Structure formats: structure tokens, C-alpha cells
Image (spheres, helix red, strand yellow):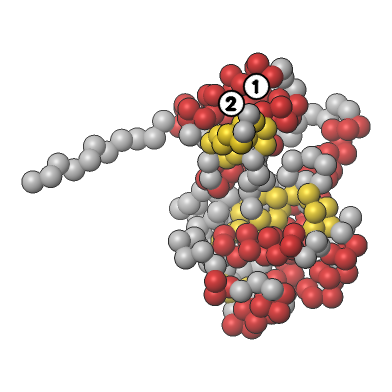
């Protein structure tokens, strides 16, 4: 008879301690758009020296939060998967705001609130407005997109919200197909429709396979582009017109 594997509790304190360091937290946030970045960029994000950044990154790699890929002489770092971003987003819901100490920081904060990525899908005001448009058009159904923490049943991490089941409608599949997103060809091992509680807007934005596919399509159409800072997204003139024409969205820029 095979012995059952030993059941263990998770070491939340160790994971929290890794995130709790301000420099490592800034690095993880810098990687939260799913892209791979070199150590020099992450050092700039954290405001530390290259040597200090190397020490922090080694700890994150050892813990499994971050993976590293070598390309020639350069090493690039990325989050090990969406669960790390999920944990960061959940913490952001209950974290106090960082003090704004410069005009540059103020501008960047405003840009992150306006439009950013949450790993591989859109977030910020752009993300919740997109979710609202999909609900208003009947592409999605099941809830109204408003985060009500007092009513939420948290049987899953807060940023994914297991208490509400959004569903893609048949009419919604056709509308998305016209936009170039085939909801029948999403990765099979990933739930198609999930939501995150957007920490800056306190509303829902679209996650899951569909959220990732829709964001990828908007980048492909050049309706959105990466901004100057990690995670920041900018809507192009063509994108603003296209989103209004196709989804009835009025984009704040």
C-alpha cells in the first residue's frame, strides 16, 4: 500500500517576508505586467544598486516567485506565473497608499490608475471600463462589475473572487469574434472568464483566458501600447476611436 503524501501547511510568513521588503516589492510590481526585464531595469525600479538588486533577485528566484532566463550575456527576470501577481493585487486591496513625494511619482501613479496591465490582462480605469462595456453590451452576464466586499464570499483569493460567476454569452462570442478574439480557441487549461478586484478602482476587471486574449488583441491592433514605465498602458488615437466604435467606450486619456 502506498503511503499518502505528508500534508503540510503553507508558510505564509516566509512568503510575506519576501514581499515585505520595499525593494523586492517594487521589483515584483515592476514585473507585474508579465514581461521579462533585465536586472538593471529592476534595480532602477527599486532605487538600489546593481549589486543589491542581484541579492534581492536571487532570493526571489530561490523562493520561486521569479524565474530567470539567460539570453547571451544578459539575464532577464519575470514572474513565475499569475499567482504571484494575484497575491500582489490582493495585498494592494488592503494596503495603505504610498506617499507621493515628487511630480514624477505623481504622474506615474496617475498613469497606473488610468490604464495598466494586471499580469496579462488590462486593469485600472481602462480595465474596469472595458468590463463595464462588455456587461452593458451583453457580452458577459452574471453580475454588474461592482465590488461589494461586505457581500463577497471569499472561497478563493480576493483578486480572483470565487463568489461570482461571470459567463460569456452566445451573442458575446460573436461580437468578440468580429473584434478578432475567438473565445472557442482559448487555452483549455485556464478558466476562460475570471475577474480581479481592481485595487485602484474597487471594481471588477476581466481576467482569465478571455481577459488575456482580449488584451493581446488590443495590443495587436495597436489600440493600446506600452507606456514608458512597467505596467503602464496607453490608448492610441486609433484605439480610442475603435473602442468607442466597437464597444461604446469613452476612453479617459
The answer to whether 1 appears left or right of 226 in the picture is: left
Q: Position of residue 147 (x, y in %)?
A: 65, 56
Mark 2 and 1 residues: CB-CB less than 8 Å, in contact? yes
> Mark 1 Cα within 10 Å, few/some/many (few <14, many 20+)?
many
* Picture quadrant of residue 111: top right
In the displayed structure, 56 sits above or below 134; it is above
- The secondary element bearing badge 2 is classed as helix
In the displayed structure, 182 sits above or below 93; it is below
Q: Where is residue 164 in the image (x, y as percent from the top left)?
A: 54, 63
> Mark 2 Cα within 10 Å, few/some/many (few <14, many 20+)?
many
Q: Nearer the viewer, residue 129 or 38?
A: 38
Q: Nearer the viewer, residue 38 or 79?
A: 38
Q: Which of 29 and 148 is in front in this view?
A: 29
* Picture quadrant of residue 135: bottom right
User: Can you name the residue that lies furthest to the front here?
Assistant: 72
Residue that carries the numbered disc 2 in the rendered image: 57
The answer to whether 242 appears left or right of 49 in the picture is: right
Q: Distance between the residues labelled 2 and 1?
A: 6 Å
Residue 104 visible to the viewer: yes
- The secondary element bearing badge 1 is classed as helix
The residue under the point 84% across, 75% down is 245
> Quadrant location of the C terminus?
bottom right
Residue that carries the numbered disc 1 in the rendered image: 53
Q: Where is residue 110 in the image (x, y as percent from the top left)?
A: 84, 43
Q: Position of residue 46 (x, y in %)?
A: 71, 26
The residue under the point 65% across, 82% down is 174
Amino acid at each position: 500500500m502506498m503511503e499518502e503524501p505528508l500534508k503540510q501547511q503553507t508558510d505564509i510568513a516566509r512568503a510575506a517576508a519576501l514581499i515585505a521588503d520595499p525593494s523586492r516589492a517594487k521589483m515584483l510590481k515592476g514585473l507585474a505586467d508579465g514581461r521579462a526585464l533585465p536586472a538593471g531595469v529592476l534595480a532602477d525600479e527599486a532605487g538600489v544598486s546593481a549589486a543589491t538588486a542581484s541579492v534581492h533577485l536571487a532570493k526571489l528566484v530561490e523562493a520561486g516567485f521569479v524565474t530567470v532566463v539567460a539570453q547571451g550575456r544578459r539575464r532577464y527576470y519575470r514572474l513565475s506565473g499569475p499567482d504571484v501577481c494575484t497575491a500582489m493585487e490582493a495585498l494592494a486591496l488592503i494596503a495603505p497608499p504610498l506617499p507621493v513625494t515628487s511630480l514624477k511619482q505623481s504622474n506615474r501613479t496617475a498613469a497606473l490608475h488610468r490604464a495598466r496591465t494586471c499580469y496579462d490582462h488590462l486593469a485600472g480605469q481602462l480595465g474596469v471600463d472595458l468590463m463595464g462595456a462588455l456587461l452593458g453590451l451583453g457580452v458577459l452576464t452574471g453580475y454588474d462589475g461592482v465590488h461589494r466586499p461586505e457581500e463577497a464570499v471569499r472561497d478563493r483569493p480576493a483578486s480572483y473572487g470565487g463568489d461570482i460567476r461571470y459567463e460569456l454569452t452566445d451573442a458575446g462570442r460573436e461580437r468578440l469574434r468580429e473584434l478578432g478574439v475567438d473565445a472557442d480557441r482559448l487555452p483549455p487549461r485556464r478558466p476562460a472568464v475570471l475577474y480581479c478586484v481592481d485595487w485602484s478602482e474597487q471594481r471588477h476587471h476581466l481576467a482569465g483566458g478571455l481577459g488575456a486574449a482580449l488584451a493581446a488583441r488590443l495590443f495587436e491592433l495597436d489600440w493600446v501600447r506600452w507606456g514608458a514605465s512597467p505596467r503602464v498602458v496607453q490608448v492610441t488615437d486609433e484605439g480610442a476611436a475603435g473602442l468607442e466604435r466597437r464597444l461604446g467606450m469613452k476612453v479617459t486619456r
